[in-house]
C-alpha cells in the first residue's frame, strides 16, 4: 500500500518519476491521449506490477513509449520503409506502430506475441521523462475495464494506494487512446485500434488502403487473443449500464427520449450523453453534453462516463456518431463501454 503523491509534471516531479522507474516502481504520467501507468519496459520485475495495480489480464499487450526514432533499434528487429514514412509524418503523436520485437523486450510486455507496440508521445511532460533514456511500458492509468483517465484526479480516484506517484500534466488533449497500426507483416497495414490519427490520414500518408482489423467494431470471439490493447469485449465501462443509440440524429433523439422516460418511470436514474444540439432538444431531461464535433466528443467521452458515476446514474443513454474520421475511434470505445448493447434508430 502506497501513499500516492500527486505532483506537478515539472522538473522536480520528473526527477522523482525517473528515480522511481529506475527502482522498478510504477508512475502515473500524462500523455496527449490519456494518462498512462508506466514502468521501465525492460525491467521484468517492474512490468508485472502494472497488471497487479490495474487488475489487468496478462494476455493484454502493453505499449512501449519512446522519446524518438533512435530508441527503436534496441526494441525491434527491423523498421520497414512504410513505418519510417509514418514515423516522419505522425511522431511525436497519437500513433502506435506494431513491429517485430527484439529479444530485449520481455514477453510480459507483449503478452508473448512476436511483435511490440511502440509509440512516441507528444505531451511535453511525457517527452521530458522519456528523454531520461528509459523506454516506458504504459497502458492507460485506470482500473482494468473502467473508462480511461484524462486527468490526474481520475488516476488518483482509481489507483490511490496502488502506485507511489502521479504526475499532473493537466487534462489530456486527445482524450482517446492512440491509434494502433500493425505494419509488422507483408501486405496492407491493419488498423487494430482507431484513434486521433484516423484511418483516412493513414491511407493518405501511405498512399494505399488500410485494412480494418477484426475486433474494431465487433467483439472478439471467446478465447480469441487480443492483438492490441482495448479489444476486450467490455472495456471503458462506468458502473452504470450503457445503451448506445446508432442511426440518424432525428431518430436518435426520438428513441433516446422514449428510453429515458421509460427508465425514469422504472427509477433507473437515467443520464443522456449526446451532442450539444441533441442535448438542447432533449431538455428538461438530465443531459450531459459532449460537444459539437467528433473531436470534442472524443476528448470528453471518458470524463463524461466517469461523471455519470459521480452523479449516481443507473443507466447511460449514449448517442453514437458516424464511423468516419475520429468518429470511428469514438464508436470503437462506445461499443465496448456498452458491452455491444446497441439500439438501431430508424
Image (tube, grey):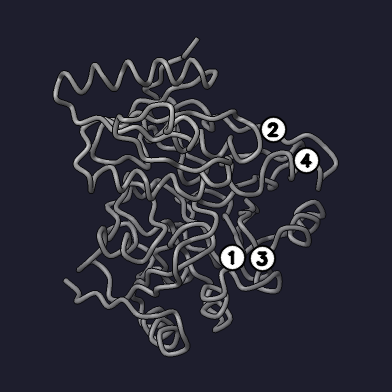
Q: Position of residue 286 (x, y in %)?
A: 29, 34
Which of disc 4 and disc 2 is earlier in sequence?
4
Cα separation between marks 2 and 4:
10 Å
Q: CA distance from mark 4 to mark 1?
A: 21 Å
Tag 1 or tag 2, which sits nearer the N-term? 1
Report the disc number at residue 121.
1
Disc 4: which residue: 203
Q: Position of residue 142 (x, y in %)?
A: 33, 55
Disc 3 residue crowd, few under 14, some 14–19, many 20+, Cα 10 Å = some
Tell me whether circle 2 and circle 4 mark residues in contact (CB < 8 Å).
Answer: no
C-alpha distance separating marks 3 and 2 = 23 Å
* Residue at the image point whose x is 61% and y is 67% from the top: 122
Q: Nearer the viewer, residue 18 or 29?
A: 29
Label 4 environment density (alpha carbons within 10 Å; few <14, some 14–19, many ≥20): some
The numbered mark, 4 or 1, whose residue comes first in the sequence reads 1
Is the residue 132 above or below the residue 176 in the image?
below
Nearer the viewer's eye, disc 2 or disc 4?
4
Picture mark count: 4
Residue lying at the far left in this picture: please name it: 267
Q: Residue tagged by mark 3?
A: 92
Q: Disc 3 or disc 2, which is closer to the eye? A: 3
Q: Which residue is mark 2?
A: 211
- Circle 3/circle 1 CB separation < 8 Å: yes
Give the quadrant of residue 46: bottom left
Residue 80, horizontal then vertical, whole percent:
78, 54
Which residue occupies 39% across, 46% down? 59
Using a 10 Å C-alpha cutoff, classify the residue at mark 1 as few (fewer than 14 neighbours), some (14 to 19) or many (20 or more).
many
Left/right placement of residue 273 relative to residue 260 reads right
Q: Which secondary structure lies at badge 3?
A: loop
Name the residue at the right extreme: 207
Q: Residues within 10 Å of mark 2 (few under 14, many from 20)?
A: some
Amino acid at each position: 500500500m502506497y501513499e500516492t503523491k500527486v505532483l506537478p509534471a515539472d522538473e522536480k516531479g520528473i526527477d522523482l518519476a525517473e528515480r522511481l522507474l529506475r527502482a522498478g516502481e510504477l508512475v502515473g504520467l500524462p500523455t496527449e491521449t490519456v494518462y498512462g501507468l508506466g514502468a521501465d519496459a525492460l525491467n521484468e520485475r517492474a512490468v508485472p506490477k502494472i497488471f497487479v495495480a490495474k487488475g489487468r489480464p496478462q494476455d493484454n499487450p502493453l505499449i512501449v513509449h519512446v522519446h524518438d526514432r533512435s530508441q527503436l533499434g534496441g526494441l525491434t528487429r527491423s523498421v520497414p520503409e512504410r513505418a519510417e514514412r509514418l514515423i516522419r509524418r505522425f511522431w511525436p503523436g497519437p500513433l502506435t506502430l506494431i513491429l517485430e520485437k527484439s529479444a530485449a523486450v520481455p514477453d510480459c510486455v507483449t503478452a508473448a506475441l512476436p511483435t511490440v507496440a511502440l509509440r512516441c508521445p507528444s505531451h511535453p511532460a511525457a517527452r521530458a521523462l522519456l528523454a531520461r533514456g528509459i523506454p516506458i511500458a504504459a497502458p492507460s492509468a485506470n482500473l482494468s475495464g473502467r473508462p480511461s483517465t484524462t486527468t490526474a484526479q481520475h488516476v488518483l480516484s482509481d489507483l490511490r494506494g496502488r502506485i507511489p506517484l502521479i504526475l499532473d500534466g493537466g487534462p489530456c488533449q486527445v482524450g482517446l487512446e492512440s491509434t494502433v497500426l500493425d505494419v509488422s507483416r507483408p501486405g496492407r497495414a491493419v488498423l487494430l485500434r482507431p484513434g486521433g490519427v484516423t484511418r483516412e490520414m493513414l491511407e493518405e500518408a501511405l498512399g494505399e488502403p488500410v485494412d480494418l482489423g477484426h475486433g474494431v467494431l465487433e467483439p472478439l470471439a471467446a478465447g480469441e487473443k487480443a492483438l492490441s490493447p482495448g479489444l476486450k469485449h467490455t472495456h471503458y465501462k462506468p458502473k452504470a449500464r450503457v445503451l448506445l443509440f446508432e442511426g440518424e440524429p432525428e431518430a436518435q433523439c426520438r428513441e433516446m427520449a422514449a428510453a429515458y422516460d421509460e427508465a425514469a418511470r422504472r427509477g433507473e436514474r437515467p443520464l443522456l450523453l449526446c451532442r450539444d444540439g441533441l442535448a438542447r432538444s432533449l431538455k428538461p431531461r438530465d443531459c450531459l453534453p459532449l460537444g459539437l464535433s467528433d473531436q470534442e466528443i472524443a476528448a470528453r467521452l471518458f470524463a463524461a462516463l466517469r461523471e455519470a458515476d459521480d452523479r449516481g446514474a443507473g443507466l447511460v443513454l449514449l448517442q453514437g456518431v458516424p464511423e468516419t474520421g475520429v468518429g470511428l475511434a469514438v464508436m470503437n470505445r462506445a461499443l465496448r463501454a456498452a458491452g455491444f448493447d446497441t439500439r438501431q434508430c430508424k
